[in-house]
Structures are given as C-alpha cells and as structure tokens.
Image (tube, grey):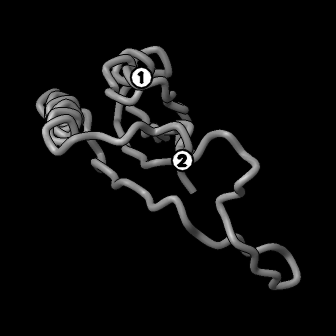
Amino acid sequence: MKDFLLIFRSEYKEVPQRTEEEAKAITKKWMDWVGGIAAQNKLTDRGNRLFNTGKVLKSGNVVTNGPYTEIKESIGGYTMIKVGSYEEAIEVAKGCPILSVGGNVEIREVSPM
C-alpha cells in the first residue's frame, strides 16, 4: 500500500456565496465522502481546509505574501489516503465534492524519506 496526497484546488475568486443551508449540504457531502474512505480503511489523514492567505519563504530568507493573487486556482485543502496504486487513488478522488463545483483534485504519491 502507498500513501497518496489529494490536494483540492478551486478558483477561489469564483466561489459562490452560499446560504447556511447550502453550506451545510456541501459540508455533509465532504463528511460523507471522507467517511466512506475511512470505512474502507483507506484514510491516512482526513486533512484540513486551508485559509486563502499565507506567506512564501524564498531563498535568502525573503518572505512574501501568498497565495499569489494572479493565479486562478487556490489550494483549499488536502487529504491523505493509503491505496495500492495511482488508479485506485484516482477512483477514490472521483467522489470528491469539489469536482461538483468546478474544482479539481491533484493526486500525488508520497515518497517515504
């Protein structure tokens, strides 16, 4: 079994304003999806949502604001799963609720150190 990182991206400037009921419904979709992964014993770390603010440290100890406003997509969160292959990781990612709102899931195998 291998660890894979699922990175959730969306165009954060185009995220629609949601009513409280809509926000609860999308949160339930996320919880159900993550719960389904856990029920299959494939969840390594449910991860977290990320704020759309941050800092970038560059060589020479230069610190800048991030994420960059000129990019279209922003990383909104992540989840870690344990599956046998990229193909299986893709199948897990296909159920991600971000896909239903125009976002995408980047799938990366984690290299043990």
Query: Which residue type carries mark 1?
Result: Leu
Secondary structure state at the residue bearing disc 1: helix
Secondary structure state at the residue bearing disc 2: strand
Percent x, y of residue 44 = 29, 46
Q: Residue furthest bottom?
A: 61
Q: Is residue 42 left or right of residue 7?
A: left
| Cα separation between marks 2 and 1 | 14 Å
Which residue is identified by label 1? 99
Q: Is residue 74 left or right of residue 36?
A: right
Q: Residue furthest right?
A: 60
Residue in the foreground of this view, choosing between 103 and 48: 103
Q: Is residue 57 visible?
A: yes
Percent x, y of residue 33 = 21, 29
From the viewer's perspective, is residue 4 above or below residue 84?
below
Residue in the foreground of this view, choosing between 5 and 21: 21
Q: Is residue 112 left or right of residue 56?
A: left
Q: Which tag, 2 or 1, sits closer to the chain's start? A: 2
Q: Quadrant of residue 18?
A: top left
Q: Is residue 26 left or right of residue 6?
A: left
Q: Residue at x 43, y 58 (%)?
A: 50
Residue in the foreground of this view, choosing between 107 and 1: 107
Percent x, y of residue 9 = 52, 38
Q: Which mark is residue 9?
A: none
From the viewer's perspective, is residue 57 above or below residue 83?
below
Which residue is identified by label 2? 75
Number of residues whose C-alpha sits closer than 10 Å to that of mark 1, classed few (under 14), some (14–19) or many (20 or more): some
From the viewer's perspective, is residue 23 above or below residue 62?
above
- Which quadrant is home to the N terminus? top left
Residue in the foreground of this view, choosing between 9 and 94: 9
Number of residues whose C-alpha sits closer than 10 Å to that of mark 2, classed few (under 14), some (14–19) or many (20 or more): many
Q: Residue at x 43, y 40 (%)?
A: 3
